[in-house]
């Protein structure tokens, strides 16, 4: 017989799922979370956002010692790379955080049900785990099943030399030549790790530019910087297949010579993970593998809700987190809230790229009149002191109301700086609001103020 029903059962313990579970517990619900992996945290924490940032930070430190220490008056000799130590540190970071989530579950009395969950009806989930089967009833069900790497039919993974992003986080050696198919966020971030450590990295992007969908001017500047760093970037490059011979991979490109490498990373995006969980059998409407929901994240079936990568949109951990909180608050009769215009997007290369709101291309397509304010890092005192003068801050504001429409940053600590812009967008702020706000000196955020001043043609330092 099924157990006594929970108030909420969450299917998936990624950023959307585990945070939704915690919020539900705060609201007084009896909560369970079904997770098939051996650790909580989902792709982002276990094999995505967190481990990749650990490797990016380690490799950037190495790069700084090699190439920038002398600028600060330091002589550094005999620097070596211990990949195993770097990977060990990455794993320690991940383990500490997954255990932290487990501790939060205990603190909030959330039951972790280990196993693969499948919808049995609109109010029950069957779980297959190492200890057998279990039927769970729930007054509410929240699907937070996440996503998996896209595998192209003509580039199947062998998980050894033709790899996805998960395997790329655990390569035990610095590749001689890493070919990356896909010039998006994942490909450039993981390519950066191994490029800094000495690998030759070739990026093959089928679209006319890398980072499709981001502000064109920012991407153009970033592309120049990346090529200067040593990236071999080929846009408009259509890969047609790959063959492996021992430890070598030959990558075939339409209309061009084949490329030989020792690793091929296929990083063309991710897709919603919705198979074999009974969603369609339960009557949940799907389109192109993505769950369809209303503005309350309700699927239209029973009390089943869905969030995160499973419902499409931008596949960002922080988007899933906010959707999870909002969905649970709707369940509890409260007013959930997610402002998608204020969801920031970050590329953790160096320099970093961060944006919130619309790009110039999107505003032009929509026929919206706007003004632009820009400020280069070369004119910011703190950036110069850091020897980080590449890039700029760019602000787009409505031509008649001055309301912020988009903010785009290419430069040092852009991932941190974008938070100010996200708050301003959330509160429907204007460029003038940022321009009139006092920013401490000397700091990187001053560039945001200067770009806001530049919208009105009155930047002080440029």
Image (tube, grey):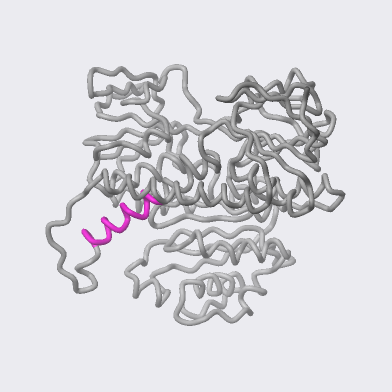
Tell me where residue 406 appears, x and y as whole percent.
62, 58
Horizontal relation, residue 378 to residue 218: left or right: left
Horizontal relation, residue 351 to residue 83: left or right: right
Query: 358 or 14: which is nearer to us?
Result: 14
Tell me where residue 67 appears, x and y as whole percent.
22, 60
Tell me where residue 217 appears, x and y as whole percent.
49, 53
Horizontal relation, residue 218 to residue 366: left or right: left
Query: 49 or 381: which is nearer to us?
Result: 49
* Residue drawn at (70%, 65%) of the image: 403
Q: Main secondary structure of the magenta part?
A: helix
* Magenta-colored span: 54-67
Above or below, 18 relative to 142: below
Image quarter (top left, top right, bottom left or bottom right) of the N terminus: top right
Q: Magenta segment: does it hold 62?
A: yes
* Residue drawn at (53%, 47%) of the image: 214
Tell me where residue 360 appears, x and y as whole percent.
59, 53
* Residue drawn at (53%, 33%) of the image: 37
């Amino acid at each position: 017989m099924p157990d006594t029903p929970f108030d909420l059962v969450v299917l998936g313990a990624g950023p959307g799922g585990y945070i939704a579970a915690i919020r539900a517990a705060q609201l007084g619900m009896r909560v369970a979370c079904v997770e098939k992996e051996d650790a909580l945290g989902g792709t982002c924490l276990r094999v995505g956002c967190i481990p990749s940032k650990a490797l990016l930070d380690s490799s950037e430190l190495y790069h700084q010692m090699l190439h920038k220490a002398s600028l600060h008056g330091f002589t550094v000799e005999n620097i070596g790379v211990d990949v195993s130590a770097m990977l060990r540190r990455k794993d320690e970071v991940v383990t500490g955080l997954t255990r932290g989530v487990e501790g939060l579950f205990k603190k909030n009395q959330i039951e972790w049900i280990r196993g693969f969950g499948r919808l049995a009806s609109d109010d029950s989930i069957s779980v297959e785990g190492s200890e057998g089967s279990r039927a769970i009833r729930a007054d509410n069900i929240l699907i937070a099943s996440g996503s998996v790497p896209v595998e192209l039919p003509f580039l199947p993974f062998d998980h050894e030399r033709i790899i996805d992003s998960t395997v790329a986080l655990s390569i035990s050696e610095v590749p001689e030549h890493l070919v990356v198919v896909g010039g998006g966020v994942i490909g450039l971030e993981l390519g950066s790790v191994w490029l800094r450590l000495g690998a030759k990295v070739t990026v093959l992007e089928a679209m006319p530019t890398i980072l499709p969908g981001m502000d064109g001017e920012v991407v153009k500047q970033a592309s120049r910087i990346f090529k200067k760093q040593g990236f071999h970037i080929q846009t408009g490059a259509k890969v047609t297949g790959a063959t492996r011979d021992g430890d070598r991979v030959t990558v075939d490109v339409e209309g061009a010579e084949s490329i030989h490498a020792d690793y091929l990373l296929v990083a063309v995006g991710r897709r919603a993970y919705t198979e074999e969980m009974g969603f369609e059998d339960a009557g949940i409407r799907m389109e192109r593998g993505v769950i369809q929901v209303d503005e309350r994240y309700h699927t239209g079936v029973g009390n089943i809700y869905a969030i995160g990568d499973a419902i499409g949109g931008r596949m960002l951990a922080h988007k899933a987190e906010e959707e999870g909180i909002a969905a649970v608050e709707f369940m509890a009769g409260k007013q959930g809230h997610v402002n998608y215009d204020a969801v920031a997007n970050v590329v953790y290369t160096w320099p970093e790229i961060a944006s919130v709101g619309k790009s110039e291309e999107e505003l032009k397509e929509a026929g919206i009149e706007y003004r632009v304010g820009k400020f280069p890092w070369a004119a910011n005192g703190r950036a110069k002191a850091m020897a980080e003068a590449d890039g700029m801050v760019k602000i787009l504001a409505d031509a008649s109301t001055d309301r912020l429409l988009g903010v785009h940053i290419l430069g040092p600590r852009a991932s941190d700086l974008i938070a100010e812009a996200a708050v301003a967008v959330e509160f429907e702020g204007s460029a003038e609001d940022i321009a009139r706000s006092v920013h401490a000196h000397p700091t990187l955020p001053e560039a945001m103020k200067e770009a806001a001043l530049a919208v009105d043609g009155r930047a002080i330092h440029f």
